[in-house]
Amino acid sequence: MKFIVYDIFLLILFVVTAFFFLYTRRQNLKKEGLLFLYKTSWGIKLINHVGNKYKRTLNILSYISIFIGYLLMAAMIYLLGKIVYLYLLFPSVVKTIKVPPIMPLIPYLPQIFKLDFLPDFYFTYWIIILAVIAITHEFAHGIFAAYNKIKIKSTGFGFFPFFLPVFLAAFVELDEKKMAKKPKFPQMAILSAGTFANVLTGMFFFAVMWIFFSLAFTNSGVVFDTYQYSLVGVANITMINGIPLDNPSYNEIMSLANETGFNKIEANNNKYVAEKSFLGRQKNNRGKIVLYDDAPAINVGLEGAIIEINGIKVKSLEDFREEVSKYSPGEVINIKTKTKEGGVKEYEIALKEKPGKKGSPWIGIGFIDRTKSGVIGKFYRALSSFKKPYVYYEPKFDGISQYIYNLLWWLVLISLSVAMVNMLPVGIFDGGRFFYLTVWALTKSEKKAKKAFTISTYFLLFLVLLLMVFWAISFL
């Protein structure tokens, strides 16, 4: 039975338990705006203890927290600008991504939208991550408030009633009147403390993920991205499936292509193969099309992670290249691969001579350089920096290793994402008031600060609305 069945059962059990808990303690519930809040005094003694005991440390951390707050605000504004640019100029990419720009992180999100580039996201992940992120975020607010002698009135959690008691949020209720009377610096330290805690949480679990990965996985093969291909001018194609051509058009190529299987194509004295569906996706490619080289790998349908060549295990790209180089064109080798389903396949492959390199053996697989530039690229590279490129890592403990690793991966990603989003200069986030206090401090005018705060909030919300509109248009 797949794990998702157990996960859905746990989701149902959680909803029923939460309903029962809230119903029996409904006297503690209070509606504020769209949220129902369940107020308690959990953790207040601990918060006050930390806030009053470690004053010197918290004084230093106040400066670090505010500095990180500004960095996150700048990074999030830049990232939002990049997303707007992408949505406005590349609707085809937006259509491929599928997910709307504003979407609550719900269980099974990657599965629902079939986002293969993300690991599965289960309810058990969601509830664990929510607890870790929300508690550390709110407790950090409370600790810095206690350090600055601001009373903590209550703690607790809230939920959206129209989403059932599943979409929860933790909170620490402060004495807002007393906080408003404090100087700007302590207010900003308190506001940025939650995101600072999220950053620290992300860094901590990144270290845990790194250590866990090294203990729970072992490099066991080589993963290739594609078969080797070439960009060929349509007019240079001289033959398709044995039929000679003279300066053909794209439509003529399509009319002669077989519906199923590989079409044999010749151009520039070289041989290529391509399925008709693959050719059909290149109609507007400015007179050129991508064709797979007529290589051994694609002709035998090689797929999966390569784990052995003639009984010799390969654990890296260097191992793979070294092993293949031992043979000559025309020799037959046995390759074993590990499939996505966990099975093992064997292939007998007759090596060919590599085009342009006389005497060099050739299989015909490709390794795409996935190095990404910019903030997003660097962020994703950092998340997997401990992994070697093109290496297949096999879990030492079936199921458990991958489950825990994905949980840690999501925990790091969401911790840092929440930290960035929360520092947007928008009224509903901590970053809104943080921005307001910053403008006030710079201009010495509360009126100008309120105006800048209002403009920033409405402008950024307008951008978000614009993103939603362009996302919807991309599917028309």
Image: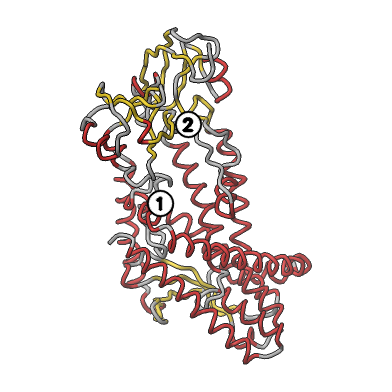
Q: Which residue is mark 2?
A: 395
Q: CA distance from mark 1 to mark 2?
A: 20 Å
Residue 86: mark in rendering? none
CA neighbours of label 2 inside 10 A, class few (<14), some (14 to 19), many (20+)? some
Q: Position of residue 273 (x, y in %)?
A: 33, 27
Q: Which residue is mark 1?
A: 124
> Which image quarter: residue 364?
top left
Q: Position of residue 83 (x, y in %)?
A: 48, 61
Residue lying at 43% horizontally and 30% vertically, measured from the top left: 229
Which secondary structure, mark 1? helix
Q: Position of residue 216 (x, y in %)?
A: 53, 33
Which secondary structure, mark 2? strand
Residue 450 position (above or below residue 67):
below
The extreme front residue here reads 246
Q: Is residue 447 left or right of residue 6?
A: right
Which of 326/280 is in front? 280
> Which image quarter: residue 47?
bottom right
Residue 408 position (above or below residue 63):
above
Residue 177 position (above or below residue 249):
below
Residue lying at 48% horizontally and 20% vertically, measured from the top left: 355
Residue 432 position (above or below residue 277):
below
Q: Earlier in the sequence, mark 1 or mark 2?
A: 1
Residue lying at 49% horizontally and 68% vertically, measured from the top left: 170
Q: Position of residue 163 (x, y in %)?
A: 32, 68
Q: Amino acid at mark 2?
A: Pro
Question: Which quadrant holds the C terminus?
Answer: bottom left
Q: Amino acid at mark 1?
A: Thr
